[in-house]
Image (cartoon, helix red, strand yellow):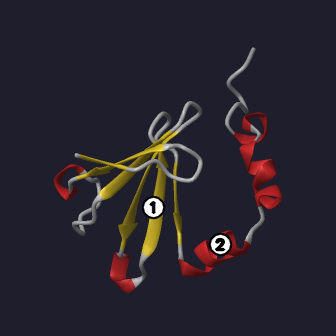
Amino acid sequence: MNTMPPGPSGAERTTVPASSSPDDHGADRIILRSEFATVAVWLRDPGGRPRLHIEDLRTNQGVELDALELESLAWARHADLTPLLDPSATRWIGTGD
């Protein structure tokens, strides 16, 4: 496992060898950690359709994004992402009371 310089948000980044990655295609995982979240990202190429897999390591919730979805993120403003950052909107549904 190799530690990389912190990302722009100050989150710690670590690469994990492919042998410990859940991906069958040999891609390395990158683990990003902050005080709020720990996620792993890696490239998957199912049937020649590459996608970036993002997984919340606390809950194992994951998503795969294709090139168009990633391009849309690249053009998004931080304000566009604000609704996604509210854990009460998605992550805490059905966990209370």
Does residue 92 lie above or below 42 as drawn? above
**How busy is the neighbourhood of tag 2: few (under 14 within 10 Å), some, or many (20 plus)?**
few
Name the quadrant containing residue 71.
Answer: bottom right
Please provide percent x and percent y for residue 19: 16, 54
Q: Is residue 46 left or right of residue 26?
A: right
Numbered label attached to residue 95: none
Identity, as a three-letter code, of the amino acid under mark 1: His
Q: How far across and how far down the image is residue 50, in percent?
A: 42, 78
Circle 1 residue: 53
Q: Which comes before the other along the chain, label 2 or label 1?
A: 1
**Identity of the residue drawn at 76% across and 58% down:** 78
Q: Nearer the viewer, mark 2 or mark 1?
A: 2
Amino acid marked by disc 2: Ala
Q: Quadrant of the C terminus?
A: top right
Q: What residue occupies the far top of the structure in this picture?
A: 97
Residue lying at 72% horizontally and 74% vertically, measured from the top left: 75
- The answer to whether 12 is drawn above or below residue 15 in the figure is above
Q: Is residue 29 left or right of residue 11?
A: left
Q: Whole-percent x and y of residue 68?
A: 61, 81
Q: Quadrant of residue 94?
A: top right
Mark carried by residue 74: 2
- Residue 21 falls left or right of residue 12: left
The single residue placed furthest to the left in the displayed view is 19
Helix, strand or loop status at disc 2: helix
Farthest residue toward the front?
5
* Local secondary structure at mark 1: strand
Residue drawn at the location 59% of the way across and 73% of the way down: 70
Q: From the viewer's perspective, tell me whether residue 41 is left or right of residue 2.
A: right
